[in-house]
Image (cartoon, rainbow, N blue to C red):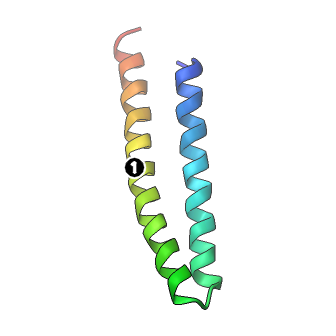
Amino acid sequence: MFNKTLNRKVFLFWSIFIMILCSISITFSSDNTFSDSLSISFSVLAGFGLFFTAAMLLEEVVHDICNP
């Protein structure tokens, strides 16, 4: 279950999550409209990436459980 592929996916999941947190903090702390719109767009795209990465992790865990 914890092979190198899963570890890469877990690392990708947490790095995208940290990028979303940084982008949200930039959105709240920035006064520039361009910076706000750019960080909000990045947050939305990173949210999609986080969702699909979590879906791949869940699929791999279910696959490992069903096919030992």
Q: Write down the residue under mark 1.
A: 51
Q: Identify the element where label 1 is drawn.
A: helix
Residue drawn at (36%, 10%) of the image: 67
Q: On screen, 15 above or below 30? A: above
Residue drawn at (54%, 43%) of the image: 13
Please state the horizontal and vertical placement of residue 30, each as a whole percent of the image.
62, 85
The total number of labels drawn is: 1
Q: On screen, 58 above or below 48? A: above
The quarter in which the C terminus is drawn is top left
Q: Nearer the viewer, residue 40 or 60?
A: 40
Q: On screen, 34 above or below 23? A: below
Please state the horizontal and vertical placement of residue 28, each as a whole percent of the image.
60, 83
Q: Is residue 57 left or right of residue 17?
A: left
Residue drawn at (40%, 18%) of the image: 65
Please state the horizontal and vertical placement of residue 48, each as a whole percent of the image.
38, 54
Please state the horizontal and vertical placement of residue 22, each as a whole percent of the image.
63, 66
**Which three-letter amino acid code belongs to the residue tagged 1?**
Phe
